[in-house]
Structure formats: C-alpha cells, structure tokens
Image (cartoon, rainbow, N blue to C red):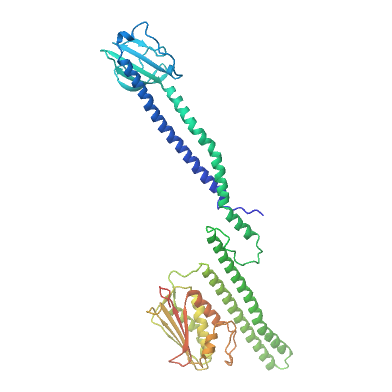
C-alpha cells in the first residue's frame, strides 16, 4: 500500500519541498545571472572605452598634414570587430579624415570631449572625442553599441550555458535528496496504516530518524490514551454488569413477591422494597456514569485538554447549596448539618465537579453516621499550605487505618456499616482530586470523634 505524506493544502510534503527548493534554486540562478550580466557589461565597457581612448591618443599625436595625405594607408582588417570601429578627424568643423565605415555626420558633438553616447543615422555609437595636436582639430573614435552587446552576449553565453545545463542535474539531485529526506515519514505512514485497528502497542523509537521521533512519541502517547480509554470503557461495562445484577435480581424477586402476595400489607411491603431497589439501581447507574465521565476528563487532562472557568467556582456557595439539598434527609434521621465559611472562596475548576466532590463526601458522612449525629463542613480560604481547603467531619464511628487505606477502590465497602451502597463514592472523589491536583488527608476528627476528611487545593506553585 502506498501512503502519501500530504500537506494541509492537499499537495504532498515532497512536492512542497521540491517546489520550494527548486524555486529558490531558480531564483538564485537568475540573481547570479543578472549579477554576472551587470558585472561583465561594466568591465567590458571599461575595457573597450580604454581601447577607444588609446586609439584616439595615437591619432592625436599625428600631424594633420600626415593624416590628410592621399596615400595615407588604410588600416588592414585584423579583427572581425574592426569594421564596427569608426574614426573621424575634424578641422575647423570640416571632416578631413574618416575611416571607410564612418558616417559623414559627427559621431558626437564636436564641443564635447571625452566619452559620450550618440545615435547617428539610426545607429547607437560609443564615442571618445579628443582635441588634436594642432588647433581646431578634433579626433573622434567611435564603436557601435551593437558590437559591444554582441561581445557581452558571447561572453555570457559561454558562462550561462554550463549553468543552464547543470540545472536539470541539480533538480534531479534535489528530487533525490528530498525523496530520501521524507522516506522516514512514508515508512511511518505505511507502518501505521498496516497496523491492526486493535493494536495499540507503541511504535519502536530506536529505528526512526531523530526528526521523526517527536511524531512517533506523540503517536505512542495517543495510542496509550486510546488504550486507557478502551480499558476504561471495558471496565465500566464489566462493573455496570456486575453491580446492576444484584439490584435487578432483588427488584425481580420483590416484584414476584408482590405478584403472589395474599394481603395488601404483604403487597405494599414488597412494592416498597421494589421502589428501594429501583432507587438503589438508579443511584448506582448515576455513579457509574459519573465515574466514566470523570475518567474521560482525566484522559483529556493527560492529553493537555483541561478546562476551568475563568472566574472560578465559589466553594462556600456550593457547600451551602449542597447542605440545603441534603437537609431533608438529615432531618429524617435527626442529624445536624453545620457549615462554617469565611465568605466566598474561589477555586479554578467547574462548578459541576465541585458539586460532585463535596456531595459524595457529605453524603458519605450522613450515610455512615448514626441517627442524631453531627456533620460539620468547614471552608477555608488561601493560606500558606493551600489556596483553599474544605474539611468534612462527622461524629460517626470513624474508620480504622486499614479501611482508610482502601477507600477509593472500586466497589469497596466497609462491612458491618448497615448501609447500602456501591462503594463508588470514594472512587469518584479520588478521581476528581487526581484530575485537579487536590490533596486529600483522612484522620480521626479531634472535635467530633468520627472521620475527618480534608481537601487541599494547590497553591500557584502546584504544591498542596
């Protein structure tokens, strides 16, 4: 199977690299060609201007009478460019001597000495004018600009052709180098494409290039999170099936009892037990779903996807609302709920999770404390030890150290408590605390004698 490394724009990474490198190479080649053109033209003009001045200097030293002789020999044709050089000698504004290829009009203004450029009879000339040895004599030596361009093109052609012929070889070399550079990505893509969908084991790092290693590590991290998520789902399914079997069986049994009851009292008692079983199953399902959601939150947090409200959540307001919601149930057992808070205390986490955290702790304190017991909730603000603190303590029987060590295990329940439950409340508390770095301590309550649970939100340094 062929796997293309494709860039976001739809074009492959190899094609993008080739276009970029070849574009830069072509741009540099054109820049070098332009620089060579400019430099060669400048040096060529300097050289040919020097030749014009030398030729003019030789004519200036000649006597006008010698130049005007009828038997003055014409210079032999020694070079193919010689016909493109013209000579004129002017005396008192009259043309007295000229070469056979020179026009009859002045090559340049007779009053301007030195180098200049002019157009005569449609031809552009580069002219050097100099005063003669005798008065009122002007010597002009000119060269066609076309001759200079021809020489320049000939010089550049000899340089540009090898460079032009080398471009295809350079392009082939760049293609080969780029193809080799992206080969590890192609091989990685093929390895990932050929993997079994159920295979979530990490990719080997020892055989990949250093540049590809960060991508492989990121993929391995993704595989690890996917494996944890799948394992969490499998565990949730198994836990739900295991825990729901008992209340459903009890509901079925009570329904059968109600169905076969002979008196209204028996039927009412069976239906009441059925409703209790439904309530227990509903609470269990709610806790299982809550725990599964928290595990998903933890996986997203491991991947860097954490979310917290901008203004934070008020611990005091949340605790006050929860105590108001749980007050009717506490009153049924004559339990006393008490809240001690200094005022608003904000923590950087969603209000829903703060409610989950505190509800499970307060609910456990009420559930496992006897009738007429006291449950005290204390909220504290920032201190040297923590950014915020919540203490939940009760006057119940407390827990031995070995039981405290096992709190948080799934479906672990303290035997002999006389209370129904699934053992998931503390698992939920531990999960939320781990997700937001909240410290938890358990000890005997110095004031009430039961269990005291303290939550510590970390300071800015991250230490609780």
Q: Quadrant of the N terminus?
A: bottom right
Q: Residue at x 46, y 70 (%)?
A: 309
Above or below, comparing residue 368 to residue 463 in the picture: below
Image quadrant where residue 379 sits:
bottom left
429 and 119: which is toward the camera: 119
Q: Is residue 329 visible?
A: no
Name the residue located 39 percent from the left edge and 16 percent from the top edge: 86
User: Which corner quadrant holds the C terminus?
Assistant: bottom left
In front here: 379 or 201?
A: 201
From where the camera sits, is residue 312 visible?
yes
Q: Position of residue 427 (x, y in %)?
A: 55, 80
Residue 275 position, x and y percent, is 64, 85
Residue at left offset 70%, top offset 87%: 253
**Residue 354: image location, x then y, percent:** 49, 77
66 or 264: which is nearer to us? 66
Left or right of residue 138: residue 148: right
């Amino acid at each position: 199977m062929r796997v293309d490394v494709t860039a976001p724009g739809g074009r492959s990474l190899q094609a993008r690299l080739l276009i970029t490198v070849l574009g830069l190479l072509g741009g540099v080649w054109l820049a070098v060609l332009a620089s060579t053109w400019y430099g060669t033209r400048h040096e060529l003009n300097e050289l040919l201007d020097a030749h014009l001045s030398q030729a003019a200097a030789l004519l200036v030293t000649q006597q006008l009478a010698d130049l005007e002789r009828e038997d003055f020999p014409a210079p032999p044709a020694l070079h193919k460019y010689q016909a493109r050089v013209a000579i004129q000698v002017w005396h008192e504004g009259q043309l007295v001597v000229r070469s056979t290829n020179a026009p009859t009009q002045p090559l340049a203004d007779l009053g301007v000495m030195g180098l200049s450029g002019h157009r005569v009879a449609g031809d552009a000339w580069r002219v050097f004018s100099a005063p003669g040895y005798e008065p009122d004599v002007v010597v002009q030596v000119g060269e066609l600009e076309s001759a200079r361009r021809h020489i320049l093109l000939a010089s550049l052609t000899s340089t540009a052709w090898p460079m032009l012929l080398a471009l295809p070889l350079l392009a082939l070399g760049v293609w080969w180098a780029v193809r080799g550079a992206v080969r590890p990505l192609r091989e990685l893509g093929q390895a990932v494409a050929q993997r079994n969908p159920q295979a979530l084991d990490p990719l080997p790092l020892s055989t990949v290039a250093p540049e590809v290693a960060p991508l492989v590590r990121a993929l391995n991290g993704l595989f690890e999170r996917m494996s944890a998520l799948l394992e969490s789902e499998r565990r949730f399914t198994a836990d739900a099936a295991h825990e729901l079997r008992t209340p459903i069986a009890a509901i079925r049994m009570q329904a059968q009892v109600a169905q076969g009851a002979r008196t209204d009292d028996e039927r009412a008692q069976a239906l009441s037990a059925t409703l209790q079983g439904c309530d227990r199953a509903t609470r269990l399902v709610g806790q299982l779903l809550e725990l599964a959601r928290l595990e998903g939150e933890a996986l997203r947090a491991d991947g860097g996807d954490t979310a917290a409200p901008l203004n934070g959540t008020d611990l005091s307001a949340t605790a006050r609302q929860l105590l108001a919601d749980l007050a009717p149930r506490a009153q049924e057992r004559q339990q006393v709920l008490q809240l001690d808070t200094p005022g608003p205390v904000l923590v950087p986490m969603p209000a829903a999770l703060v409610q989950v955290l505190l509800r499970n702790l307060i609910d456990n304190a009420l559930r496992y404390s006897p009738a007429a017991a006291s449950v005290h909730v204390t909220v504290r603000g920032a201190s040297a030890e923590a950014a915020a603190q919540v203490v939940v303590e009760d006057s119940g029987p407390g827990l031995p150290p070995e039981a405290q060590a096992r709190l948080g295990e799934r479906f672990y329940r303290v035997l002999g408590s006389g209370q129904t439950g699934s053992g998931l409340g503390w698992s939920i508390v531990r999960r939320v605390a781990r997700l937001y770095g909240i410290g938890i301590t358990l000890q005997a309550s110095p004031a009430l004698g039961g269990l005291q649970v303290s939550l510590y939100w970390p300071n800015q340094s991250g230490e609780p």
